[in-house]
Image: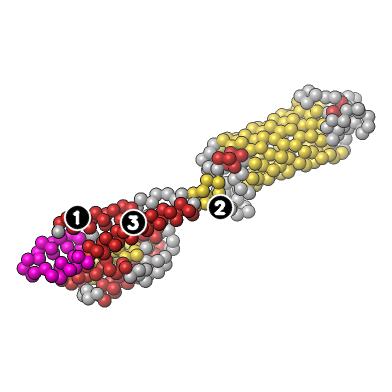
Amino acid sequence: MKKLMIALACASLSATAFAQDVTEVPTQKYSVATNSFWSNWFITLQGTYSNYKDAAANQKLLSTPVWGGSVALGKWFTPGLGLRLKANAFQYKSMTFPAKNDHKLKMWTGTLDVLFNVSNMLCGYNESRVWNVIPYFSAGVIRNCTQNNYGALIGGGLISTWKLGKHVNFNLEASLKGTGVGFAGLKKGTSKNYTADAIFALEAGFTFNLGKATWNKVPDVDALIAANQAQLDALNAALAESQAENAKLREMLKNAPKDGGKTIIQEVKSFASVPTSVFFNIGKSKIASKKDLVNLEALADYAKANGCNLVVTGYADSATGSADLNQSLSEARAQAVADALVEMGVDSSKITTAAAGGVDTLSPASYNRRATVEVK
């Protein structure tokens, strides 16, 4: 008989330990939840070191280094794809008109850049990743303020970013863009060199994330189903074993001689002192499964036979609902189990109810939607 009670206690402890062993939810590597339109915006401020290659004047790409600055506003639509609008202003020394404006031409550019975060695309999104590599394609307009003309601009670049904090990144950027030959001011047809003018730039600065800058991982449904099924199989097995042992105990208690059943009564009492759980669906105070009531029958029989007091404690999961709602719900659940015990023949004066409100003692949260019955 003692071996029987030890086996039953171990089964109960194993089921409880299994229920509390779920520590994290598996997620997909390359998928994230869609954020709102106002999430994942950013502003970039950079200093620029650039060189303008004037094809009409046969200037080399690195012959006219100048300093400037840029500002950009952008948004990431996914961890791997984003857009930004960027404006850059600079002034360079021209060899096309050596006698005008002391060789200086003022220009600005405005571009739309398509950004590809290859770190997230190839390795999956990782909120804690420090370094990201972002190539981009660029198209826009260039304005020659000195010569009062506009031109098309097309090219690309590479951005390397280092995370300094949740909302701040340090970034280095290199780009190469091209525009029409002679854009710096030489009239069309006066040059035999028809290669395009080019702008090479090196930039350094900071990117400031606006609002929510992270992405929520998508749960791996297949992995969750597999884990939950394994958990359900284990719980069902433990329940079936418990029900079988309860039936044996009831039969033994029923047939035990009045003067020779003390050992059995003591062993049943040790079993009865372990809280018995009855579970509920979210937001409900109706007992979810009649199978749970089977677990109460042995406890009810023992309480009736020995005049024991029972304490019924109701719980709700704190992950859902307000504190007031969870308190009321836990009270209703405790009362529902108390009513079930009365229907089984337990004297209502022997039953005390208590309500613990919303708790998070078990994982997953659904295991906290319960009521426990304990012998006192």
Residue shown at 24%/66% (left/top)? Answer: 311
* Along the line of sight, the residue nearer the viewer: 64 or 200: 200
The residue that mark 2 highlights is: 33
- The quadrant of the image that shows the N terminus is bottom left
**For residue 209, side relative to residue 289 (left or right):** right
Q: Quadrant of residue 59?
A: top right
Q: Secondary structure at mark 1?
A: helix
Residue 234 disc label: 3
* Along the line of sight, the residue nearer the viewer: 365 or 231: 231
Estimate the spatial distance between the alpha carbons at disc 3 and disc 1, rounded to whole Å: 19 Å
**For residue 256, side relative to residue 208 (left or right):** left
Q: Is residue 265 magenta?
A: yes
Under mark 2, the amino acid is Ala
> Which residues are drawn in magenta?
247-273
- For the question of whether residue 288 can be seen, the reply is yes
The disc, 2 or 1, on the residue closer to the chain's N-terminal end is 1
The residue that mark 1 highlights is: 6
Residue shown at 77%/42% (left/top)? Answer: 140
Q: Chief secondary structure of the magenta span?
A: helix
